């Protein structure tokens, strides 16, 4: 699920900026945009993220704005001049635009900024704080997802109950129609064969077993949502079973009202599946 954390802190005239953004992903994908001065902390940064964030695409920005005059970052002019000289040999160039692009990418920046042990410790604390802020953001979103899932399950239960109420009348109506057809035949039929055919037909129409299984799947899904060690994959497997019962009900129902409810159930199930993608 998405998450965001950002902190700025002034450490001995050095403004440290740390930002972490996360979006959905099947695995853990860490992308770093880190100022050269922080090479000493890369291993700690990766380790901290892996320990606290299980999956997601994680973009991390770790930058510095040195506010002291004597520690201004100098540019390597000789490298830039040599680069432009080579380009002039073969191209007509806009030097100002090229210089702007080069400096924006920090390719030719000499970083003389260093940190003492005390400052390094403060930066590590700041990193942990940003990660925790990002996790709080994700937990807030998680609570919102949980509310949406409960609403969807409640709707599925409501549709299931409506189908169950329609089902009892539907079977009775079919039986009455059969009796009417038989009376019109004036007993000119093989009763034994007819009974067999009726049993077979009623069994094909009957959706009570599917309704019962659907009820248990929805109950199981709700109980798993309450589990503190909730797993997105497990909920996804339960969704597959819920979808299987809904599809079977739709194919066997042969009833407009039930099939309309089945369409609504499928729509609600898709919402659940989308939300589950955000769950670890």
Image: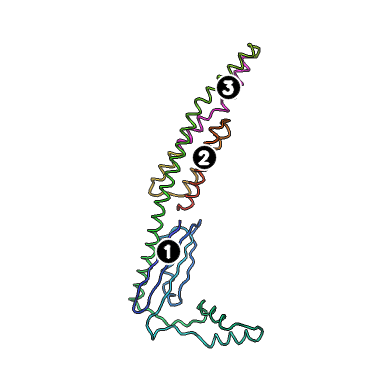
Q: Position of residue 132 (x, y in %)?
A: 37, 62
Q: Which residue is mark 1?
A: 49
In terms of image quadrants, where is residue 128?
bottom left
Mark on residue 219?
none
Real-space Cα separation, disc 3 to disc 2, in angstroms: 30 Å
Predominant secondary structure in magenta?
Answer: helix
Of callouts 1 and 3, the N-terminal one: 1
Q: Residue at x 58, y 34 (%)?
A: 251
How many C-alpha atoms fall within 10 Å of the one at disc 3: few (<14), some, or many (≥20)?
Answer: few
From the viewer's perspective, is 248 left or right of 19? Answer: right
Q: Position of residue 280 (x, y in %)?
A: 45, 53
Real-space Cα separation, disc 1 to disc 3, in angstroms: 62 Å
Q: Which secondary structure, mark 1? A: helix
Q: Residue at x 54, y 82 (%)?
A: 99
Comparing 107 with 175, the one in front is 175
Asked if the stretch drawn in magenta spans residue 13, the answer is: no
From the viewer's perspective, is 4 left or right of 190? Answer: left
- The structure's colour scheme is rainbow
Q: Which residue is mark 2?
A: 264
Mark on residue 199?
3
Residue 205's place in the image compared with 214, above or below, is above
Comparing 30 with 50, the one in front is 30
Of callouts 1 and 2, the N-terminal one: 1
Q: Residue at x 60, y 87 (%)?
A: 85
Asked if the stretch drawn in magenta spans residue 208, the answer is: yes
């Amino acid at each position: 699920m998405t998450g965001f954390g950002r902190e700025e802190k002034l450490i001995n005239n050095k403004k440290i900026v740390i930002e972490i953004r996360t979006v959905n992903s099947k695995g853990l994908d860490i992308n770093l945009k880190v100022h050269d001065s922080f090479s000493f902390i890369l291993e700690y940064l990766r380790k901290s993220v892996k320990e606290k964030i299980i999956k997601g695409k994680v973009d991390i920005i770790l930058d510095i704005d040195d506010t002291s005059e004597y520690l201004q970052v100098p540019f390597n002019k000789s490298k830039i001049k040599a680069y432009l000289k080579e380009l002039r040999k073969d191209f007509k160039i806009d030097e100002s635009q090229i210089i702007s692009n080069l400096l924006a990418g920090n390719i030719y920046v000499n970083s003389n900024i260093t940190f003492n042990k005390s400052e390094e410790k403060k930066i590590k604390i700041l990193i942990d704080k940003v990660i925790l802020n990002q996790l709080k953001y994700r937990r807030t979103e998680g609570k919102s997802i949980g509310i949406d899932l409960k609403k969807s399950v409640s709707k599925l239960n409501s549709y299931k109950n409506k189908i169950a109420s329609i089902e009892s009348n539907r079977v009775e109506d079919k039986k009455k129609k059969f009796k009417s057809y038989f009376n019109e035949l004036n007993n000119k039929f093989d009763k034994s064969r007819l009974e067999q055919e009726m049993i077979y037909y009623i069994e094909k129409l009957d959706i009570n077993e599917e309704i019962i299984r659907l009820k248990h799947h929805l109950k199981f899904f709700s109980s798993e949502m309450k589990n503190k060690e909730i797993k997105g994959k497990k909920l996804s497997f339960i969704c597959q079973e819920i979808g299987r019962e809904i599809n079977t009900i739709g194919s066997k129902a042969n009833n407009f009202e039930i099939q309309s409810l089945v369409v609504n159930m499928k729509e609600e199930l898709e919402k659940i599946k989308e939300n589950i993608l955000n769950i670890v």
